[in-house]
Amino acid sequence: MTDKKLIRNFSIIAHIDHGKSTLADRILEVTETVSSRDMLDQYLDDMDLERERGITIKAHAVRVVYKCRLDGMQYILNLIDTPGHVDFSYEVSRSLAACEGAVLVVDATQGIQAQTLANIYLAVANDLEIIPVINKIDLASARPEEVSEELGLVLGIAKDKILTVSAKTGKGIEDILDRIVVDIPPPGGDENLALQALIFDSEYDLYRGIVVFIRVVNGFIESGMKIKFMAENTVTTVEEVGILNPRMIKKDTLSAGEVGYIITGIKEIGNISVGDTVTTVKDSAIKTLPGYKKPKPMVYCGLFPIEGIHYEELREALGKLLLNDSSLDYAPEISGALGFGFRCGFLGLLHMDIVKERLEREYGLSLVTTAPNVAYRIVLTDATILEVKRPSDFPAEEKIKEIQEPFVNVTIISPKDYIGDIMALANSKRGEFVDMQYLSVERVEIKYVMPLSEIIVDFFNLLKSVSAGFASLDYEFSGYKTSDLVKLDILVAGSQVDELSAILHREKAYATGRELVTKLRKLISRENFEIAIQAAIGKRIIAKDRIAPYRKDVTTGLYGGDITRKRKVLEKQKKGKKKMKRIGKVSIPSEAFMSFYKIDSGK
């Protein structure tokens, strides 16, 4: 059994692009966990997508051994590198639940950002020891003194407790490791008690089934042991246990305080869930560990295979991805225009984009995505409350008493020069001003309450645009509020296209309807019959356009003679076009379903 006093479990948390992954790289190098020959930038970010975008999408665990300079003892450090984007805050919360401490990284050139504050609150809520670190001090634009003052103000600690490092050059890395040993407490728990292990992640292996990543809280786990997943009530036998170094290394046993993996051979995806507690069948634990609350999806869209025959492949791929990303939610959906697919729930727009790209890359699927929307709460005239996740499920207007939409608490941190432009943008998106505080002489924190529907499509990009890229954003769900919303329907050639319907604020519905109709006119191909494109609210048409038919002069072969001959031929053509219009089908390209991405009706 490993001595718990020599174990430290910690996480690295930061705003996106503040140097978490680079710091993790240097820790792997300093502790000689990975040889310099095998070392890659962003070593723990093993997805091509993570390297290309320069962001961490998944939490990655690794065990390193470090000889402390203060007492000469060798310590086992279990490091979990976490994502930084607001859409992956659930990944961060799961990582923190498996740790006793956190290294908080702040960029010396950018200072505290919105997600930095969100991560601090998460760490405090989990009662973790926080080690503040200012990174990138090697850059000419670094301002460590100013950032130290900001951090000291937020955390309420002395400036001499804040470490300054350069993860790129390796300066100060050993100081961090020494502080981890001294400041972060060893894990609690007792190996003599009944087994309780928390599942903080899992992934699917094609040959070995589901690999489960655990933090052992009490007791011990070894190969051959008969175990039970308490929430799912699944019983199985452990085939292998081991540690992540960062590759999987087989061990005989994992005891209280250790982080590692188990393989049981289970291949049925629904039998294991993240946040569940693992215990033994014999002398099992009485209660489960406090796990994670299943995150509530904020953004919904339809995912459909371009070829209908790939529906089952999409179902299987979503199930496997769910093991690796438990914040994803999905249910089958049938569309008249797109066939069989799934209505999927995501934590945000980047999360949606990443899931679609992972499905296409990792599972070889070609997908069409419908326009994103949020879940609305509708109070009917008979006082029944419905939760509606797609516009096509909206009840008739006369049955609706009120429509409630989700609102979020928004925190924006920016240099003071951009306050006016940021407030103008927030007001145009129906934002309600709450508070403004100066973090330092140059930097300000602005708080708003805003509808989530206004945030998800283009708010982040517009914020970056009006602040020259300096502003940062974080948001959290605050509740539902009644709003003056209407359902905008799109009709193509007289048929309603449910996938193009949207729920909008009444003030913006007319402008959005006009712009969407204009966009569709350019995207839909011409046919031999006229195609009418209309935007409607209820039974009222608010915008209309037409795509002219191809024209063919059927009278070119007629020379002279009575005019009635030409009229006869033209009348016959007119009847043919009328019939064609009635039975002809209009093909709507996949780009049309994402038209809302490029509409800014808030101008």
Image (spheres, grey):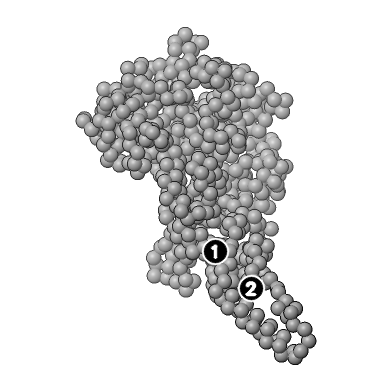
User: Split into 4 quadrants, where in the image is the C terminus?
Assistant: bottom right
For the point 54% across and 17% down, the residue is 35
Residue 28: x %, y % from top left? 52, 20
For the point 72% across and 25% down, the residue is 140
Residue 586 relative to residue 94: left or right: right
Q: Quadrant of residue 557?
A: bottom right
Residue 76 relative to residue 537: left or right: left
Residue 422: x %, y % from top left? 67, 48
For the point 61% across and 79% down, the residue is 576
User: Split into 4 quadrants, where in the image is the N terminus?
Assistant: top left
**SS under mark 1:** loop
CA gap, disc 1 and disc 2: 24 Å
For the point 54% across and 66% down, the residue is 497
Q: Nearer the viewer, residue 353 or 431?
A: 353
Residue 56: x %, y % from top left? 54, 34
Q: What type is the residue that disc 2 sits on?
A: Phe
Q: What type is the residue that disc 1 sits on?
A: Ser
In the rendered image, which residue does mark 1 sit on?
501
Disc 1 versus disc 2: nearer the observer: 2
Few, some or many residues within 10 Å of mark 1 (<14, 14–19, 20+): many
Q: Is residue 573 visible?
A: yes
- Count of numbered circles on the image: 2
Q: Quadrant of residue 437?
A: top right
In the rendered image, which residue does mark 2 sit on?
529
Residue 419 relative to residue 505: left or right: right
Identity of the residue furthest to the top in this view: 72
Is residue 203 shown above or below 391? above
Identity of the residue furthest to the left in this view: 282
Q: Nearer the viewer, residue 563 or 509?
A: 563
